[in-house]
Image (cartoon, coloured by chain):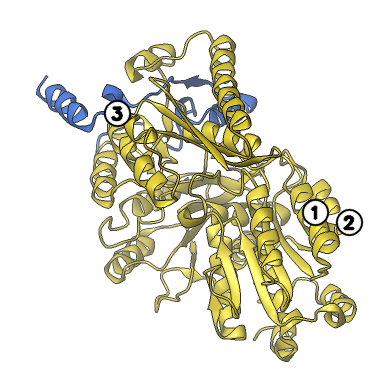
Chain colours: A yellow, B blue
């Protein structure tokens, strides 16, 4: 194995661009590793941790680009490194020619767009708080996609935003809808009467898609970040978002999706909700609060369905499956083919993984969220920081999930697997054709490893999405996967396959 | 809280700081966007950033 390290001085590129180029080059024959990072303090630590740091890389500063290539020959390593630098340089030239002027300073940017209403910030977390504060000072609402923002910064910035009557959506906010405009990773959904408040990521996407399938639409979807209901932040942005939606004439019902709130924050949230004229439906993943201030739902689809029923003035009927006849038919066909008794779930959406975990744990007993734990059922969020070190998020680069799947097969870890559970999230921001990538992975599982494990897919999307829901569903069906448009149903179906004993409990209409 | 237009009623016009694909998606929806050429301030030198911020606060 041969290795080269190249430092390109004073050459800033964002991490997504770097990871995209690196993963493209890594696919080539003879290349073992391509790592491309800016020389920030955090990235130096990262390179050390993953054993990629070299004597040369340590000299790179925060504005310098590090390119490390490992290959079968020295010539190939050097050639790939040169090519990586050339690809980035070409990208910069294209960017500069496409748009003649890109301001470096916010004041200048506002000169071009004086009535700008919002800043979308997706820069490294170490700098995000500073830029956010600057944008709030300029009366801009903020969609803060960046993560790794300190908790005390988050609380401080949210207080500033609130004082100015501005929204600070995030940090780590992946999805939002304001005034009919989707920000970040969004599905194409109709506008309507449901206002949403969420962390927000795939949970919000699942809810808006379900509402869309039921013929309802979204007024606004406000992201508040996953820590807003913590004791430290105190639900500042959630309360503000709820009051804004309550005053919004288009919003007739509100859905609030969140991790379980801090007990004190839950109490103040309860008081806030009691003062609202608009009904609030909640989905506090993993907990039910002893309160009648809101209508509580166990799952994302239940929250959406309850909202639709409320709007249509029809009773909500709890159910585990929308089409029980289809489930019976599928089971007749598939149960006999499931040899193993373990469920392995490889998710790209954190909230979807969590929902599957919460549903399956009572049915299956031990369920691990850790890929390294052998023997038990395993539901993993591959979008978690621990699996995305130096790699793009699997919603952008689903080939990373395929890689994990095939590694598990090679290690013999799928031999006792009775059901593979996947999510597949469509929409703007996501990969252009994730179904084909997953289909290719399943085909390789069969051809190279002789494994025909039932594959169950929770497909989150709409027909209006750039990838087309129907087309993605067709590709998955042809690949032999069983597709559900509701995440909870996909998880329950996986349980039915591997634990026949739970059939009675899951297939009866819930009381 | 100052008396100004609700964030939900302002027409969405965006300053995009970071990932360009977000700006591209917004443009495809007909939203006005200005893409900034963001780079770490002061060459990413944390101490220098702190000094700059202190100077800005005093000005």
According to the image, label 2 marks what residue?
Answer: A478
Q: Secondary structure at mark 2?
A: helix
Toward the viewer: A387 or A271? Answer: A387
Residues at badges 2 and 1 in contact (C-beta under 8 Å)? yes
Disc 3 designates what residue? B44
How far apart in space, not on screen, are marks 3 and 1 (Cα)? 43 Å
Picture layout, residue A73 above or below residue A298? above
Secondary element at tag 1: helix
Residue A105 picture location, percent across and down: 34, 17
Whether residue A280 is visible to the viewer of this picture, yes or no, is: yes
Image position, residue A187 (x, y; %): 64, 44
Q: Earlier in the sequence, mark 2 or mark 1?
A: 1
Compare residues A14 and A184 and report the one nearer the observer: A14
Q: Are marks 3 and 2 on the same chain?
A: no
- A123 and A444: which is toward the camera: A444
Q: Give me the residue at 75% from left, 88% from top.
A: A500
Residue for badge 1: A439
Of labels 3 and 2, the one closer to you: 3
Q: Residues within 10 Å of mark 1 (few under 14, many from 20)?
A: many
Q: Chain of mark 2?
A: A
Name the residue rendered at 76%, 80% in the picture: A497
Q: Chain of mark 1?
A: A
**For the residue labelled by badge 3, is the local secondary structure a helix, a strand or a loop?**
helix
């Amino acid at each position: 194995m041969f290795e080269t390290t190249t430092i390109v001085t004073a050459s800033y590129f964002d991490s997504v661009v770097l990871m995209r180029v690196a993963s493209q080059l890594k696919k080539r024959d003879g290349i073992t590793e391509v790592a491309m990072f800016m020389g920030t303090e955090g990235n130096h630590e990262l390179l050390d941790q993953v054993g990629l740091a070299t004597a040369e890389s340590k000299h790179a500063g925060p504005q310098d680009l590090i390119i490390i290539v490992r290959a079968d020959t020295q010539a190939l390593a050097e050639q790939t490194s040169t090519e990586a630098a050339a690809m980035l340089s070409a990208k910069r030239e294209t960017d500069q020619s496409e748009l003649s002027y890109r301001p470096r300073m916010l004041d200048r940017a506002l000169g071009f767009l004086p009535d700008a209403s919002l800043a979308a910030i997706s820069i490294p977390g170490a700098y995000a708080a500073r830029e956010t504060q600057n944008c709030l000072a300029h009366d801009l609402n903020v969609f803060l996609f960046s993560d790794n923002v300190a908790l005390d910064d988050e609380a401080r910035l949210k207080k500033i935003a609130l004082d100015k009557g501005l929204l600070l959506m995030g940090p780590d906010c992946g999805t939002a809808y304001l005034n009919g405009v989707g920000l970040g990773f969004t599905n194409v959904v109709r506008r309507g009467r449901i206002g949403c408040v969420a962390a927000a990521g795939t949970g919000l996407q699942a809810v808006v898609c379900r509402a869309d399938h039921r013929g309802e639409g979204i007024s606004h979807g406000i992201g508040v970040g996953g820590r807003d209901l913590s004791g430290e932040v105190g639900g500042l942005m959630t309360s503000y978002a709820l009051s804004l939606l309550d005053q919004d004439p288009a919003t007739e019902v509100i859905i609030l999706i969140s991790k379980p709130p801090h007990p004190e924050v839950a109490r103040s949230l309860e008081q806030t909700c009691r003062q609202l004229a608009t009904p609030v439906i909640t989905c506090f993943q993993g907990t039910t609060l002893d309160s009648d201030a809101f209508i509580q739902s166990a799952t994302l689809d239940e929250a959406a369905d309850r909202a639709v029923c409320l709007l249509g003035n029809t009773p909500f009927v709890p159910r585990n499956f929308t089409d029980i006849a289809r489930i019976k038919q599928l089971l007749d066909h598939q149960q006999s083919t499931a040899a193993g008794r373990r469920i392995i779930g490889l998710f790209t959406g954190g909230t979807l993984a969590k929902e599957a975990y919460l549903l399956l744990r009572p049915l299956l007993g031990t369920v691990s969220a850790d890929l390294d734990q052998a023997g038990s059922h395993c539901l993993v969020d591959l979008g978690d920081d621990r699996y995305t070190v130096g790699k793009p998020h699997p919603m952008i680069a689903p080939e990373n999930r395929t890689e994990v799947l095939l590694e598990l097969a090679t290690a013999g870890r799928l031999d006792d697997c009775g059901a593979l559970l996947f999510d597949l999230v469509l929409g703007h921001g996501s990969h252009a054709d994730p179904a084909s990538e997953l289909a290719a992975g399943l085909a390789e599982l069969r051809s190279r490893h002789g494994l025909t494990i039932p594959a169950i897919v929770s497909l989150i999307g709409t027909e209006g999405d750039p990838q087309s829901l129907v087309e993605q569903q067709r590709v998955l069906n042809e690949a032999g996967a069983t597709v559900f448009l509701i995440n909870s149903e996909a998880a329950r179906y996986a349980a039915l396959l591997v634990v026949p004993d739970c059939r009675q409990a899951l297939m009866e209409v819930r009381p | 809280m100052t008396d100004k237009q609700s964030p939900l009623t302002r027409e969405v016009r965006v300053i995009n700081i970071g990932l360009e694909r977000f700006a591209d998606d917004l443009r495809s929806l007909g939203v006005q966007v200005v893409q900034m050429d963001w780079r770490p301030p002061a060459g990413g030198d944390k101490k220098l950033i702190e000094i700059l911020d202190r100077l800005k606060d005093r000005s």
